[in-house]
Image (spheres, rainbow, N blue to C red):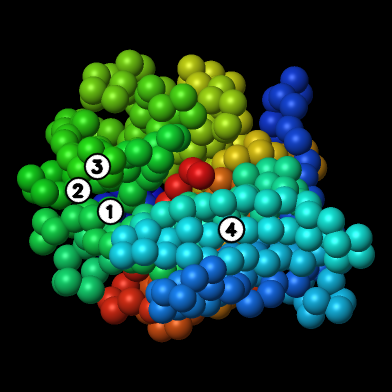
Amino acid sequence: MMIRKYFFSLIALLSCCLSLSYAKDDVYLSLSTSVKKRSDIAIEDFTAADKNANSSKYAKLLKDVIQNDLVLSRYFNIMPATSASVLISASVSSNVDNVTIEFKIFDVESGGIIYNGTFKGELSNYRYMAHEVSDEVVKRFIGDTGIARTNIVFVNNSTKHKELYIIDYDGYNIRRLTRDNKINILPKWSPKGEMIIYTSYLYNNPDLFYLDIVKNRRGIISKYQGLNATGVFSPDGNKILLTLSRGNFPNLYLINISGEILQKLTAGSYIDTSPSFAPNGQEIVFISDRAGYPQLYIMNIGGANVRRLSTNGFCDSPSWSPKGDKIVFTMRQGKGNYDLYIYDLPTAKIVRLTNSQGKNENPSWSPDGRFVAFCSSRSGKNEIYVMAIDGSGTRKLTEIPGNSYSPSWSPV
């Protein structure tokens, strides 16, 4: 009866927002959740390189975006020039269609140029160019690619239907992707960021669709009877792992991108759902109620070596970190709300990120593994938030009518 009850709760969830120990020879990297010492930098007002009125206008706009990016990165403290060790300056020129920024990073003490670069883009797309500059600054200081050019796809019901939307990581430039007047849910990015898969009731069955945002086309990948849901790409982008019911209990299947079933990974009279690949593509974390209530499990890609991760509550929507050392998930203990937790694989310790501030669900990692996007009802309705993985710096992504669900953070 409990399994049957949970099965119907899963269907309700899909209709509403359509949501151990590790092997001894596995190696996981344990990385710091935050930068211990931030760099002190100053940003001068950007100047116009010509007398074009647009140049002055975009000089200010570009500086504002870049400064915001550097603050959101949490790598830098923005300081007055007299207190900083590094100074950023730029000159901006424009014509009718394009804008160009000459960008420099100086060492304050010596006055020497650390970096000098030129970036050019369309006026209408100046924010992307600013993000490009910000990512270059991060790369020069940290050595890793920044995330300022990433996007987040999510579901919103402001039209009275659940449609897909995409937005820049900083909460600007929102665009609507679907106009189906149906239920579209659970979007996930492909590893290269050119495609989104999602479950849709467009043809009155929960089918798995793809949306190619580069070529602006879409189609059905999987349309088996019953559930075709919680689909995720393998890290190489050649396979998809999803839950299929096919008129029976929902189990995990591996299919190719044409929808052909390659392998049934789980079997039994229980529900297996919400899979997420390890970055090496060799392991999967998923949710199963085989213990009597939904818990976290890990198994090998072939379906062997299934083991439970020890938790103390009802678990859902796990997501494996890009660095491979952590799993973020939601858990409800007792009669409380769902909150976000991180399971640290090297230590088997669980860290709580949210604390009963509404329901907190559907976490998705930033591609650098330093932030998590998630859905929360803390404001009285479901909205998308972003926080650092130590639980600090929580910010609402944007203000948008209706309820928003199921964020998925793009690769760079």
Most extreme residue toward the left, as rendered? Answer: 203
Q: Which residue is mark 3?
A: 211
Most distant residue in the right direction: 109
The local secondary structure at tag 2 comes to: strand
Name the mark on residue 102.
4
Tag shown at residue 68: none
Residue 129 placement (x, y as % from top left): 47, 57
Say which of 409 and 295 sits in front. Answer: 409
| 2 or 4: mark nearer the eye | 4
Indicate the secondary structure of the residue bearing disc 1: strand
In the displayed image of the protein, which residue is found farthest to the bottom? Answer: 380
User: Residue at the spot x=46%, y=24% of the render?
Assistant: 236
Q: Are marks 1 and 2 in contact (CB under 8 Å)?
A: yes
The amino acid beneath tag 3 is Leu
Residue 405: image x %, image y %? 36, 63
Q: Residues within 10 Å of mark 4 (few under 14, many from 20)?
A: some
- Mark 3 or 1, nearer chain start: 1
The residue type indicated by label 4 comes to Glu
The answer to whether residue 201 is seen in the rendering is yes
> Toward the viewer: 133 or 153?
133
Residue pointed to by mark 2: 200
Of badges 3 and 1, nearer the viewer stands 3
What residue is shown at x 49% (from left), y 29% (from top)? 235
Residue 169 seen from this side: no
Q: Secondary structure at mark 4?
A: strand
Q: Which circle's residue, 1 or 2, is located before the other in the chain?
A: 1
Q: Which residue is labeled 1 in the image?
A: 185
Q: CA distance from mark 4 to mark 3?
A: 37 Å
- In space, the residues marked 2 and 3 are separated at their CA atoms by 11 Å
